[in-house]
Amino acid sequence: MPIYTINFPEISYPALFLICIAGLAILSGRDGRWIVLALGLQYLGVFLLVFLSWPIELAATKLIAGWISAALLGMGLRSAPLGFQRDEHFSPSSLIFRLLITGFILFAMYSLGAIVQIWFPSVGMEIILGSLFLLGSGILHLGLTTQPFRTIIGGLTFLSGFEVIYAALENAVLVAGLLAILQLSLGFLGVYFMSELVQEESG
Amino acid sequence: VSSPIIWIFFPASMGVILFLVRRWHRVSVLAGTSIALSLAGLALILPLGRLIRLGPVGFRVLESLDIFGRHFALHDHDRSLITISFGLMAFWFAGSNLAKAGRVMVPFGLVFGALMIAAFSVEPYLYGAILIEIAVIVCIPILIQSSSAPQEENQLSSIPSDMSRRSPEPEFFRGTLRFLTLQTMGMPFLLMTGWVLTGIETTPGDETIALAASMAGLGFMLLLAVFPFHTWVLMIIEKYHPYVATFIFVVFFWFGTMYALRFMDQFFWLRQAEILNYLRIAGLIILVVTGSGVIFERHLGRMLGYAILMETGYILLAIGLNSGLELVFQMLLPRALSFGTWALALGAIRDRASDLHMRSVRGLIFSMPVTGITLILAQWSIAGLPLLAAFPIRYSLWIQLASHSVGMGWLSMAGFMGLFVTGLRLLFVFLDRESQQDDTQEETWQLRFLLSTATLIMVLVGLFPQLFLPIFNHGIHAFTNLAASP
């Protein structure tokens, strides 16, 4: 019997908790360094959920690639200009809006979970819930920002949500490798965007 | 040696090497063009999977390469498609130096092309969606560098450019970020389709087919920038170098179409009359939206963007007409020729004018006569004006569509009307001479020569389509089921 058909609360509940906390921190965070840290935490949750479907050595590719992407973005932040978040408005009302919308995603996640499980009956509910939360917060993040750094974070979050559910359906090594390359490429692209902004500041 | 090593890994590695030597720009362009041309020629003459004898030596080029338990395969029947694809890249690379397209267009362009070929060749082919997404990431530096790189020498116009360095404000990245976001969202739909399709094979049912069709439809709408997911095309062409943006769009949509045809080739239910009817309707919607949008457009770059989107509409129409599949391949020549000419002319104007808004190009024809005339002719060629390159294909499409439904035939003329009227407007603007205007000639002889030659070829293709267009029909052999169906 595959491991993902077993209810495995010792792994899945902490993973869900990590993903929700990290998602909240990414959506409402202002400081780039905290956001990168939350992204690293989110990848730990993703790894735990993928571990329910894949062997640990394959699931570890998600964690390693994710952490490398986060580290790349963190390094990019070190050299980014101080005012690189200048197009983001973080008023108290904006923070309240972000918290409310995160709550809405959590609500939608529980409402949609059962419907999605009808489409993917072989996938455990915890995996579906984690995936839906990541997909939702990724889309929300992409919709709320026009800033390169945050768009990359949103893209990585959205992809993580997809990877969690896809891992339960497909376990090809080639797919794992290609998705890891995709994550790393997004990390490099984030650094590239920030380096272009640095050139503007210094030029 | 296997075919994926020759047509995927070799160009990708050469792209990386050329990136390292991008300092010698002309050498890099020459090498990149030669590599793309050689690979196109090699695909034309080298049989795959069969024994080749060179005197006493015999060898065989294998058709597939195994990686992590899956394989990349380019078969003998894919050779025409490979020839056309690398020929297309060589055509764009050749003009990149004159167009001042930036130092990374050729190196990254080779990597981009190799990734798109890999997406076409991977088996199961659904994994190609991930490779397309990686190719999108490779495109972004090409676009950004084309507009942000300082340009030391001005080859297109004799006056120094005040737009040679675009400021990378966050606004500057908006188009590429939208491109990245929409493609990232499209990829999961295509991958999930594969999983649903496995279900169709085991337990076929209307509900499963509807789910798979919806997922594939949404995935391809995002991939091919079908309305309403088309805005990134206009945003990119407005901000970045028109030649580079057009190169990315033409190559990307070409391979996107091939990837979509691969789906249709594999699954017979995607060739049902109902699905084909949806494709025709989607094509018409694109033509009506872009045809009416371009009439009110005042930015020359966005006009080109609308025309590029219009081509997707014509492609969907051609696929939707059962007998129109060969037209998809024939369209490539007029498309590459007309868009290449249009983008080159627009790049030259961009160097000279403060921006590409209509108000900035008044009286342009007096200082850049060849550029102005060529731009309008290229626009009319894409519209489908008689005697120009795309006319024979447009005519064939209109006739076939009208035989299905007269109303649809009329609606499909929206694209022609939109571009034709816009061309007339542009002509009036170009002829609108300002009182204090300086008529110093601002075209170099290289630019005049290239644009005049391209215009001549556009007219020749329009006059003698039977000599040029049937060569592209061979591309259909890559899709064995589609080629066999009536």
Image: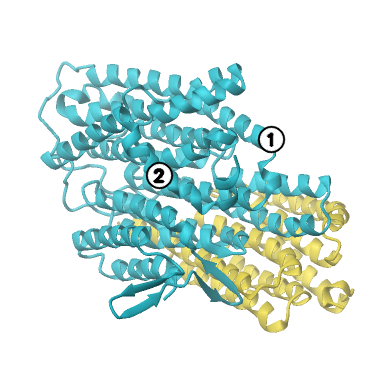
Chain colours: A yellow, B cyan
Q: Is residue B94 above or below residue A165?
A: above
Q: Nearer the viewer, residue B458 or B222?
A: B458
The residue singled out by tag 1 in the image is B273
Residue B210: percent from the left, percent from the top?
A: 77, 44
Question: Residue at 51% across / 22% down in the picture?
Answer: B399
Q: Secondary structure at mark 2?
A: helix
Q: Chain of mark 2?
A: B
Categorize mark 2 by other alpha carbons within 10 Å: few (<14), some (14-19), many (20+): many
Residue A142 visible in the picture: no
The residue singled out by tag 2 in the image is B472
Q: Residue lying farthest bottom?
A: A57
Hey, which quadrant is residue B417 in on the image? Answer: top left
Which of disc 1 and disc 2 is earlier in sequence? 1
Q: Nearer the viewer, residue B262 or A185?
A: B262
Residue B373: percent from the left, percent from the top?
A: 23, 26
* A54 sits left or right of A154 in the view: right
Question: Residue at 61% across / 76% down in the picture?
Answer: B69
Q: Is residue B30 above or below residue B49?
A: above
* B462 sits left or right of A46 in the view: left
* B102 sits left or right of B189 in the view: left
Residue A11: percent from the left, percent from the top?
A: 82, 77
Residue B131 visible in the picture: yes
Residue B161: percent from the left, percent from the top?
A: 20, 42
Q: Secondary structure at mark 1?
A: helix
Q: Same chain for the residues at labels 2 and 1, yes or no?
A: yes
Q: CA distance from mark 2 to mark 1?
A: 26 Å
Quarter of the picture containing the C terminus of chain B is top right
